[in-house]
Image: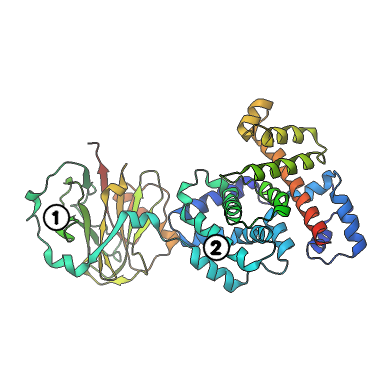
Amino acid sequence: MTCGIVTERVLEAALRRQLPADQRAALLRHLGEPCEACLDLFEGWPAEEILAMLLAPDDVLSRQERERLFATVAQPQQSSRRLVLQLASADRWRPRLAWGAAAAALAIIGLVTVRGPADRQGGIGLKGAAAPAATLVPLVGARSPTPHVVRALPPGGRFATGELLLLRIRLDAPAWVYLLSQKDGESTELIWPLQESARHEAGEFELAESGSAMAIDPTALAGGGRLLLVASPEPLEGARLQIREPLRTRAELEKTFAGCGVDLLSIFVEPR
Amino acid sequence: MISPARVEAEESDLVRNAARGDRAAQHALFDRHHRGVMGYCLLACNGDRERALELTQDTFLRALSSLRQLEEPGRFRAWLFSIAANLCRGRGAQEARRRELLAAAQLSFDATPADDDPQAREARIAVVQRLLSRVADPDVRAVVTLKYGEPEHTTREIAARLGLPHGTVTSRLVRFRAAIKRELVRAMLQEAS
């Protein structure tokens, strides 16, 4: 059913103030009357468009204004900030590696357990000859007085309250490296790199950025979650890193990121 | 035509991703709604572009920074316009003579400001009553009376009370919002004459 008076063309012309006076008067009269056919037209017309056309018919904002405005309102990755803490200069904690030296001084209360995959010892995520081998090396860090590594974290290892997870990444070939987190029931989230991704040479390096060491607060994965390492021979698009399906095992991870080296750490927060 | 349910589901995904800091999703939400928000703010500011721009900026800043508080991502649009309405009213950018027009605009977005004041509520009721007199369909009238009457009812409550499927209630409200849009156009064209 179409209305004889209110058509899309007439309405657009009216909103753009281009309608002759007599047609405009007829339109105004008609808009005050009940007419179901008119409503069909308005039903499919977003209110945003009506307001925008009424008030700024040419263009509400120029492209430059839009981009400038968006740049002022866009939000950073909030949850990544919560999970990943930027500590201090990476150089400040690197020389203080003290594998196991300070472990005895810390009260282990069994709050958080970090566990590698069952097949961890057996290999390092090779999928075909081209895939770089990648390993996550978890370390326990103390938060204060200055962030420093206090001990290595074996499979099944536990954290004391306030301790942080510091990670080293080991590669046997150059790769683009991505660290993702995934809480149970949620999509993956890219937590590192925070800025531009970069190609890393083979070897071992800290999870650091712009000279700052990155530490993971394991309690941010309360309820259960995983840290997933993906080392790709090529840079990966952001969309490729957003996975809805749960990646609980190395096999699932390898299948999802075929051709990449992968590793994962499961984190459990146990009830006190 | 894309179904409203599909649009809502797509928007829910965007909202969830944007809440995690996905810049592309934030950009998509901004692209979808900046025209409407700016239009609403222009209406509230009587065409003062600079002021409307500032209010639009603050609306998106507030919305994007508190997306995690949005319990129903599918209601992003209504929530966004509630924020815009609250900001406009809180900063005095709401001329008395335009109160009913703004109320109509809010109704068209299904936006109900959280800190609804008595004047805003009165304006909303006045708009609804005037519009109801021009809605011929008695089924739509019954739903609208419960939705915006005293007390206001949720769509689920209306469905239970009238013994209707929830989808029927929401489609009748979509019909009523079409009448609101028609009234908005009529009032604005009249004002411009």
Circle 2 residues within 10 Å: few <14, some 14–19, many ≥20? many
Name the residue at 37% across, 54% down. Answer: A79
Name the residue at 35% across, 50% down. Answer: A182
Q: Amino acid at mark 2?
A: Gln
Name the residue at 66% across, 51% down. Answer: B2
Count of number-bearing discs = 2
Q: Quadrant of the C terminus of chain B?
A: bottom right
Q: Is residue B160 left or right of residue B60?
A: right
Q: Can see residue A254?
A: no
The x, y position of residue A225, in whole percent, is 31, 46
Q: Which numbered dot is residue B57?
A: 2
Q: Which numbered dot is residue A152?
A: 1
In this view, the residue farthest toward the bottom is: A64
Instruction: Compare residues B154 and A219 and report the one nearer the observer.
Output: B154
Quadrant assignment, res B40: bottom right
Q: Chain of mark 1?
A: A
Q: CA distance from mark 1 to mark 2?
A: 48 Å
The x, y position of residue A8, in whole percent, is 80, 57
Instruction: Compare residues A22 and B43 and report the one nearer the observer.
Output: B43
